[in-house]
């Protein structure tokens, strides 16, 4: 069966975003430091229009290429899709990524508020799922057509999938930064019986890539 | 100048001990899982009497040997030295490590309660320091005679040295375990301006060793 994979940049003290995320500061205070390693990569710049040409090729390159390969659909939380809170209102918000988002497949956004799908350029369509994480994953698996599903975040959504035993692979891009505050990824998992197997570690400039297989997980309460 | 180094086993969710540490369960619930990788090593068993002979030689071996090399003295917190709380009473407690502790040098224990030094077999002497982390480090540096000082823990003491800008090297032995609760190492550092440089990462069976240089740090409040 297709896997649910989460590959996410994280500070050494466990945060995937800084404090006070907002429209002006979507990654929170200091959060942009978590992504410097990938923004510098040629492999990343190639797939994100508007970043310009060039970039580095280093030990992170095959990790990013592997991460992007064999993905047929995505799931993300509402707080990653945008800073909008509550009902969608006039539905002007179409994500952070401009007219041609870098997904090029169907993206299922978890929300409490109904909204019609939004078709973007380049093959990306955002679907809004209001009936929970299992439903979003099921829809994404169907859309992926046998390929894997990428879980982008944020922290709360990743935790929910992890605790529910639905995540198959977790790759942490560990950045040598201490944010001190923000959105902690692996928090509040006290009652989740999650077991991990270390798959591999890759040292690269300014980041270490730690990949784990989730071998069991379910909330025991 | 001699360096202050901290090398510590940590769960992927950031805990260096499980919850409810006690005399019966010094590492807290589940905390023993953080140390399985090192207990299996020949390099570790050799230096700890009572563990028996044999053991594994793998990618962790040079990491542990490097970690133990060039150490002339140690610092640890009272909560790592023992579960005793408050004044020392009849002073029967001499640590977790039997008559011949694996240090073989002077160990400075941070405490609020005065106590005379305790000389053990094999060259280990425990000194009890009541006037703060700077004093303990200064005494340990003198005792180390030009070698480095090892900071053993626990979490609170490591955080204090890190936030004060006194730690030079931090090596995290990251174990693929989620404890969910316990003593979180890198917590409550919101106002500390700590900057790290990644030195190296080593993948080994059941653990990844992440080594960082602390390039700046001081509490800004």
Image: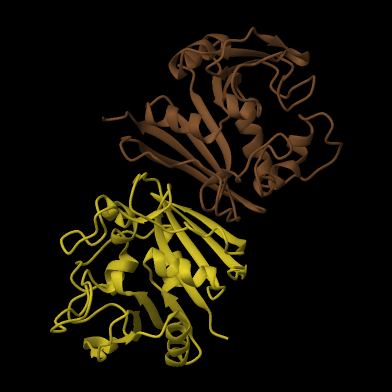
Chain colours: A yellow, B brown
Where is residue A102, by image quadrant?
Answer: bottom left
Identify which residue is drawn at 42% across, 81% down. A132
Q: Position of residue A33 (x, y in %)?
A: 29, 51
Q: Outermost residue, top direction?
A: B116
Where is residue A199, by image quadrant?
Answer: bottom right
Q: Nearer the viewer, residue A190 or B135?
A: A190
| Figure disc tally | 0
Identify which residue is drawn at 61% across, 46% down. B18
Where is residue A53, by image quadrant?
Answer: bottom left
- In the image, residue B100 above or below residue B83: above
Q: Position of residue A130 (x, y in %)?
A: 35, 84
Locate residue A97 relative to residue A76 in the image: left or right: left
On-image quarter of the N terminus of chain B? top left
Locate residue A16 relative to residue A114 in the image: left or right: right
Tell me if residue B208 can be seen: yes
Locate residue B127 relative to residue B216 in the image: left or right: right
On-image quarter of the C terminus of chain B? top left
- In the image, residue B63 above or below residue A164: above
- In the image, residue A72 above or below residue A192: below
Q: Nearer the viewer, residue A117 or B62?
A: A117
Q: Position of residue B55 (x, y in %)?
A: 81, 43
Tell me if residue A62 can be seen: no
Q: Nearer the viewer, residue A71 or A109?
A: A109
Locate residue B12 relative to residue A176 in the image: left or right: right
- In the image, residue B56 above or below residue A119: above
């Amino acid at each position: 069966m297709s896997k649910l994979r989460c590959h996410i940049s994280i500070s050494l003290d466990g945060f995937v975003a800084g404090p006070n995320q907002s429209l002006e500061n979507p990654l929170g205070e200091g959060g942009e430091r978590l992504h410097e390693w990938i923004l510098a990569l040629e492999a990343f710049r190639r797939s994100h229009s508007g970043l310009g040409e060039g970039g580095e090729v280093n030990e992170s390159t095959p990790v990013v290429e592997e991460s992007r390969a064999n993905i047929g659909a995505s799931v993300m939380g509402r707080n990653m899709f945008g800073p909008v809170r509550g009902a969608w209102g006039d539905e002007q918000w179409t994500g952070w990524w401009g007219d041609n988002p870098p997904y090029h497949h169907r993206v299922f956004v978890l929300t409490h508020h109904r909204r019609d799908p939004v078709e973007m350029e380049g093959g990306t369509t955002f679907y809004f799922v209001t009936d929970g994480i299992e439903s979003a994953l099921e829809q994404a698996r169907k859309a992926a057509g046998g390929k894997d599903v990428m879980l982008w975040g944020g922290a709360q959504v990743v935790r929910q999938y992890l605790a529910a035993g639905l995540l198959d692979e977790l790759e942490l891009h560990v950045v040598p930064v201490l944010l001190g505050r923000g959105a902690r990824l692996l928090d509040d998992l006290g009652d989740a019986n999650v077991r991990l197997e270390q798959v591999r570690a890759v040292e690269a400039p300014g980041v270490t890539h730690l990949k784990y297989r989730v071998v069991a997980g379910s909330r025991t309460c």
